Amino acid sequence: MTTSARLDKVVIRFAGDSGDGMQLTGDRFTSDTAALGNDLSTLPNFPAEIRAPQGTLPGVSSFQLHFADHDVLTPGDAPDVLVAMNPAALRANLADVPRGATIIVNTDEFNRRNLAKVGYATNPLEDGSLQSWQVRPVALTSITVEALAEFDGLTRKEKERAKNMFALGLLSWMFSRPTAGTEAFLKTKFADKPEILAANLAALYAGLHYGETTEDFAVRYEIAPAAMPPGTYRNITGNTALAYGFVAASHRSGLPLVLGSYPITPASDILHVLSGLKRHGVTTLQAEDEIAGIGMALGAAFGGALGLTTTSGPGVALKSETIGLAVSLELPLVIVDVQRGGPSTGLPTKTEQSDLLQAMFGRNGESPVPILAPQSPADCFDIALEAVRIATAYRTPVLVLSDGYLANGSEPWRVPSVAELPTVKVEFATQPNGESDDGTPAFHPYLRDGETLARPWAVPGTPGLEHRIGGIEKANITGNISYDPDNHDLMVRLRAEKIAGAVVPDLEVDDPTGDAEVLVLGWGSTYGPIAAAAREARSLGMRVARGHLRHLNPFPGNLGEVLRAYPKVLVPEMNTGQLALLLRAAYLVDVQSVSQVRGMPFTTGELVAAITAAVDAGRPVAPATAGGRR
Amino acid sequence: MSTPIDLGMPRSGLADIPTLAEGRAPQTKKEFTSDQEVRWCPGCGDYAVLAAVQGFLPDLGLRRENIVFVSGIGCSSRFPYYLDTYGMHSIHGRAPSIATGLATSRPDLSVWVVTGDGDALSIGGNHLIHALRRNVNITILLFNNKIYGLTKGQYSPTSEPGTVTKSTPMGSLDTPFNPVSLALGAEATFVARTMDSDRAHLTGVLRQAAEHRGAALVEIYQNCPIFNDGAFQLIKDRDSQAARLVKLVDGEPVSAGTDPDRRVLVREPNGSVTFVPEAEAAGRPVVVHHAGDPDPTAAFALSRLDDGTMAHVPMGVFRNVTRPTYDDLVREQVATAVQGAGRPADDAALDSLLRGQDTWTVS
């Protein structure tokens, strides 16, 4: 007998071996969930090894999805449902699963060998250690194989491989998800392998039917659609949103997009997506190394294209000399750093925000560049357009700091219509702008615009404007080589003034009561966890203000004023306090750093605890209500 | 690859570059000379190369604004400042990558790279070989003086073993690169060697390099009067050069020396090549130079004739073959994709991309 229950939010984590297809299962469940109109947020988490030894802890790959009938800000702290495809997946994830939550296990994999591989002396399904959880044992592998008994052309191994579709079917039934999207997806994916297609569909339906007919799953849940602003929505990851943003910027500016890039996790998907968009006039060049990647982009920019290079932290280190050259040449260029755990190779597939100071200072000489950071996967689209606006308006390289969490995480995105996007206006120099000593018309490549301090962008092919630029210090206005002390001092200050004066919007502060005890200020992908934590802290009676920086250099003009307006400022970062250092240096405000570098986003709980501690510390004697608040 | 490019006749490397309007007087060397004071050391071989380039560029008939010189770091890399074309003096070793981005996005430009033995073969070795293997339509002038000049006299990757410098007081230990061998190994489609002091030869090689569609590497032996003076004296000195220089002429037997001491190159039974007096060559397989030979083996063998002692130094074009260029192919893919889409990349096309396959509507 099946009953139906209504939930307002659910967090599901699919976990299995790297080869079990958990990322695909998660992706499909996400798409089908998005189609229902739930708001959602996802967190893929996978090892750097492509195929770590089967059944081991390092080989566990997981995909967490949080969906709800209201706006979702994070992928969720703790799963309500864990799908564990083998003992390794159970062992690696159990600590995150609160007692009382549901655990669906694939019993077929709980044999002596697999248990021993991950250090289980006894079978946790039998030794009573899982009593506090609602365990739903399902012989996923054998039921899948049985359901595919009629597929004579497939080996047992091939049949076993469809077990992720069985799991998807079962979960789709439990949470009342439609499967039409997945069916269409499979039909495209296996268009030329009809038997594999039929087997995957059969496994999917078998999972659905299993849920419907088994007493084990007596309750199915419904999550109503979330209230979202009207519009057309799609689900999008940060890397795809960045790629699309640059194509849109190219379209709106009329500059052809040229990407020079070298594959690196977790940035490679931007290269992959853009290489598929040649139809939009996009040129992608896979370079021999990181340095050549940015060199190609800079060469294209010299020729009047929109030059782009995409990488992660180690790649930025290699590109830093060329970024410095672009600072000196004063040409537009965009560098995307999808940050990951460091130093060195660090944690290639895990997220971190530890490249802020590298972006800010990681070059020789006085070499300022604008820095932007998207705050969510969908915001990556807008940040790309903003980066191109600043790069072209001020003729400067711009650094965009995304991170692994934004890159692979996804959320619903209200798709803008192209006509409503900002226009990026670019004017090339076409005429001489001065006179030479003898009074004849001449082109002065370093004669600046009075307002923006940008120099003219004169591209090869323009008659009469032939000129030479380079990394050696240039004389102000003429651009000729100059070693003059006063000229160098002037040029250093002009370049700094140009970047410091770039127009960026003011910081908006969310302070519902207007008298918050604490301001939580973040940047980048901590947006979701901070917003969720602020919401929770407010519901517990704390007065919390919240602001999020998308512009890290230059800072918004009102930032100092905002910082000084609150008795306490908390700065949560997935590093050891890099933004906090910059804020203290720039504004002499004693901000308090909240930091963790675990390769994973903050949980809402961690940040609520930090906010609570700050609020408590700000109150001289703990009031009577304090206990009740927690 | 979708659409093959018609390569029935080799296209000129200058094919897509705008030329001077008809009836316009030819450009002059003066027009190609910038107003900047040249700051190389007195007697530097770079002066001769600069004069040759300034004198030869007008002959190409290209619009001056469509010519770009990109350089790295080193004495020779100051070159672009002295030419009144577009130019970029970039950073150490990276000029080939910058030139690749420029040439790929702008088929209407004649893109030149000026580099030295340190810039191209030490710090920039990676970019050089990849530009050559990709066959980007650029012309690379590699000034080889076998020494580091700008940093004041350390040995370079082309210095002979045992070179005593400030950084190698007991003599250098590294085996040097032979730039021509390296370029041939990277499957460059045009490889040549010439010398700063032979204006006519230099100009002839540069013209062929410019007209070659694809990456052209020209090694220019260039004297550094301060740190490595006389490095090429054996092949510059009138008395000694005749026996040593091997002038490569397409379709002619490879020979050294003058009558009656002329020697010709013959192939030994084991495949190696040796010079023998002309009189002894009768009946033996004489090596005839074919720069257009698709197989680079013979060109490579020629590049090995100089064992470092300058006993035999081939000069001229080692290899000149046709292979699709990277930049043409990149542009072709984009053009094919744009055409294949059947409609322009307009707002509607972009709207459709942004929406994707899987949307839902909230009203």
Image (cartoon, coloured by chain):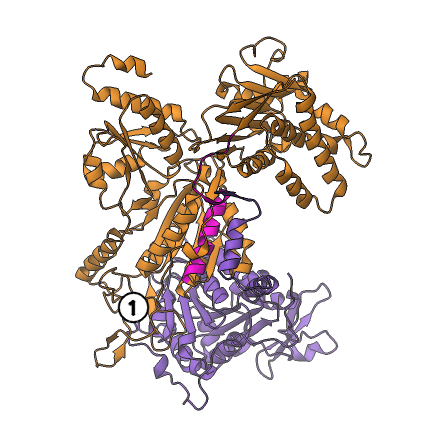
Q: Is residue A533 above or below residue A416?
A: above
Where is residue A377 shown, x and y percent of the image?
45, 41
Where is residue B185 shown, x and y percent of the image?
59, 60
Q: In the shown orientation, is residue B37 left or right of residue B206?
A: left
Tell me the residue at 59%/16% (across/down): A135
Where is residue A502 shown, x and y percent of the image?
27, 53
Q: Quadrant of residue A181?
A: top right
Q: Is residue A161 visible?
A: no
A96 or A347: which is nearer to us?
A: A96
- Residue A231 shown in magenta: yes
B258 or A341: which is nearer to us?
A: A341
Q: Which chain is orange?
A: A
Magenta stretch bounds: A224-253
A261 or A146: which is nearer to us?
A: A146
Callout 1 crowding tier (Cα within 10 Å): few <14, some 14–19, many ≥20: many
Q: Which chain is purple?
A: B
- Residue A303 shown in magenta: no
The amino acid type, in three-letter code, at marker 1 is: Pro
Q: Quadrant of the C terminus of chain A?
A: top left
Q: Is residue A333 above or below residue A21?
A: below
Instruction: Please state the chain letter of the residue tagged with numbered disc 1 in the rendered image.
Output: A
Circle 1 SS class: loop
Q: Quadrant of the N terminus of chain A?
A: top right
User: Which residue in the structure is indicated by mark 1?
Assistant: A445
Q: Is residue A333 above or below residue A536?
A: below
Q: In the shown orientation, is residue B167 left or right of residue B125?
A: left
- Residue extending farthest to the top is A128
Q: Is residue B310 visible?
A: yes
Tell me the residue at 70%/77% (across/down): B281
